[in-house]
Image: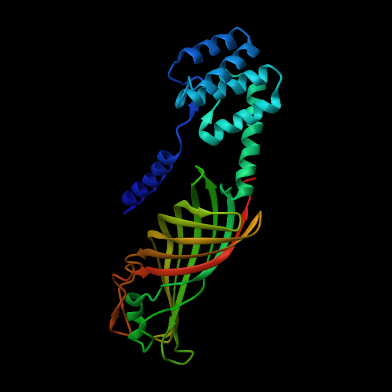
Amino acid sequence: MRSLLWKLVLAALAFALVATPVLHSSEAWAASPALDAAQQMYDGAQFNEAILKLREALTAGEVTGADAIAARGLLARCLVKAGNRLEAKQAFKFVLRQQPGWRLDANTAGPDEQEVFQLAQRELTAEQIEAGSRIPASLSFSMGSGSGDNKDMAEIAVAGGGANKYDVKPQIAGAVRFPVTQRFSLELELQRLRATNQDSNAPPNETRYEVTAYPLSLSLIHSTYTNRLVHVNLFAGGGLLSSAISAIEFGDFSGTPLTVSGQKNGSYFHAGLETELVMHRRLALTGRVMGRAATADKVLDEFDFLAYGQASLKNRKVDFSGFAATIGLRAYIGY
């Protein structure tokens, strides 16, 4: 099970990396005569001449495709060298809008060029976040409810006159999310799931039952629709159903109070839809619905006796599989 979990986590990371635009250096282009000539002028510190050459080539359509991106990147670099930093910054922004993954080659670009490029990056990112076309890093807290009847575990309670399913309690969660591309983000989330049961006896003979679990998951988030007021995301991921605990408190077990508690780790997977209502540029109200598979097997197998002489504790599982819905708050921190 652990090997399968790691494969899924690695697959999610690989998908995020594949989705990330390939980083292109300003030096990586298919050579064209106009571009070669402009590069030679740059290398010879003829920056104004290179600017004229590049503008003429771009206007006349002599460079297209990847060459056009490279030409505009070289134009921005020449503008920096010529002292026109404001126009250079705008030129860098134009390149980044066309190819978000484009980067300067630190081995060939001087500190002055890198400074202007980084300023263009920051300003463009802020503009995209303000316009709602890019989602920044964030922290979130949520609570809600979901499946958790734990009917397999409840068979122990039924033998003592209890309900045939557990009473599911509110779940809580905290998460941190960070972007990997303009549309994709990764989220690390920790949740707490809990459900309880009890038999029909009156105290002190009453027996109480509780199951808890702490899913720790890594999810891939896709920004499906976004504007300044509303974000709609699809998400899927998986991880560890950590510390899945089943506790049974026998009020009077052969004249002596007894608590039986077993703990195992299991697997956790989920997928669903999330909506965010932006109340402030740094704060949003969130809501999501999901389907999940959350189980841990043989939680009480270390105990070799029958509850109430009928229900075996062997092969019992903690199970919160099914559906869930949550609401919460998200604080954007990636500005």
Quarter-of-image position of residue 156: bottom left
Image location (x, y in percent) of residue 301: 32, 68
- Identify the image quadrant of residue 38: top right
Q: Residue 304 or 69: which is nearer the viewer? A: 69
Which of 178 and 109 lies nearest the eye of the viewer? 109
Q: Is residue 294 left or right of residue 140?
A: left
Residue 254 place in picture, x, y as percent: 39, 86
| Quarter of the image where one finds residue 245 | bottom left
Asked if residue 250 can be seen in this view, the reply is no
In the figure, 199 relative to 143: above or below? below
For the N terminus, which image quadrant? bottom left
Q: Residue at x 51, y 44 (%)?
A: 182
Colour setup of the view: rainbow
Q: Residue at x 53, y 18 (%)?
A: 57
- Relative height, residue 219 to residue 296 (above, below): above
| Residue occupying the point 70% across, 25% down | 85
Give the residue at the far bottom of this rendering: 202
In this rendering, the answer to whether 113 lies above or below 252 is: above
Residue projecting furthest to the front: 60
Relative placement, left or right, of 244 versus 229 is left
**Residue at figure coordinates x 35%, y 83% from the top left:** 164
Residue 79 horizontal side relative to residue 27, left or right: right
Place of residue 135 in the rendered image (x, y in percent of width and height, measured from the top left) = 56, 49
Q: In terms of depth relative to the viewer, which is nearer, 115 or 123?
A: 123
* Residue 233 appears anywhere in the view: yes
Task: Identify the image quadrant of the C terminus.
Answer: top right
In this view, the residue in front, 56 or 332, is 56
